[in-house]
Amino acid sequence: MTVFIFSACLGGVLVGLSRQLNGRLSISTTPLIASFWNHAIGFAALTCLGLFVGGLLPAGVAEAPWYAYLGGPIGVIFVAAGSWVIARIGAVNSALLIIGGQMVTGVAFDYISAVPTSFWANATGIVLIVGGMMVSRRRRKGDGTQ
C-alpha cells in the first residue's frame, strides 16, 4: 500500500510541476503552442518508452469502443486550459479548482456507476478544497496582491 500512496503523491507532484512548466511556456508563447509541445514531446517520450518496454500495440486494441480514445483530445483541452489559467490565477487556485473539478466529477461517476462511497466523506473533501481556495484568495487580497 505504501508504494501506491507514494506513487499517487509523486504523480501529484509531477502534475503540479507540469502545470508550472506549461504555464511558463504559455506566457512565452500561447496556451495552444504550450499544449502542442507538451503533447509532442510527451508522445515522443512515450513512444520511445513503449518501444523499449514493448507492448505498445497490444492485441485487441482495435476492439476498444470509440469513446475509449476520447482521453487524448480531452487531455489536450485540459493541458491547454491549465496552461492558460495558471498564468492568470496562480498555481494554488489553479490546482484547487482542478482538484475540485476532479472531486466533483469523481463523486458523480461513482454515484452513476453505483460504486459504494461515503457521501459525507466526499462532500467534506469537496468543501475543504473549495474552502482552501477561498482562504488562499482572501489571503492574497489582504496582501494587496492578486
Image: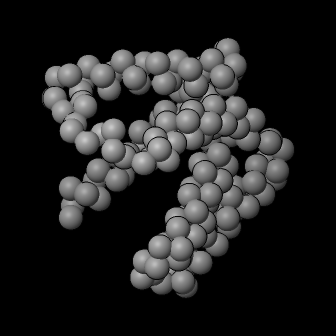
Coordinates of residue 106 in the picture (x, y in percent): 52, 65
Name the residue located 48 percent from the left edge and 84 percent from the top edge.
Answer: 118
Name the residue located 67 percent from the left edge and 14 percent from the top edge.
Answer: 29
Q: How is the image coloured?
A: one colour
- In this rendering, is residue 68 above or below 112? above
- In this rendering, is residue 42 above or below 58? above
Coordinates of residue 10 in the picture (x, y in percent): 34, 46
Residue 57 figure quarter: top left
Q: Residue furthest left?
A: 53
Coordinates of residue 119 in the picture (x, y in percent): 54, 83
Residue 27 figure quarter: top right
In the displayed structure image, the side of residue 54 where residue 117 appears, left or right: right
The quarter of the image holding the C terminus is top right
The quarter of the image holding the N terminus is bottom left
Q: Residue furthest front?
A: 63
Viewer-closest of 70 and 140: 70
- In this rendering, is residue 75 above or below 24? below
Q: Is residue 22 visible?
A: yes
In the displayed structure image, the side of residue 141 where residue 19 appears, left or right: left
Q: Residue furthest top?
A: 29
Q: How many marks?
A: 0
In the displayed structure image, the side of residue 23 where residue 53 appears, left or right: left
Viewer-closest of 118 and 58: 58
Q: Is residue 79 visible?
A: no
Name the residue located 80 percent from the left edge and 41 percent from the top edge.
Answer: 145
Coordinates of residue 104 in the picture (x, y in percent): 60, 66
- In this rendering, is residue 121 above or below 108? below
Viewer-closest of 91 and 26: 26
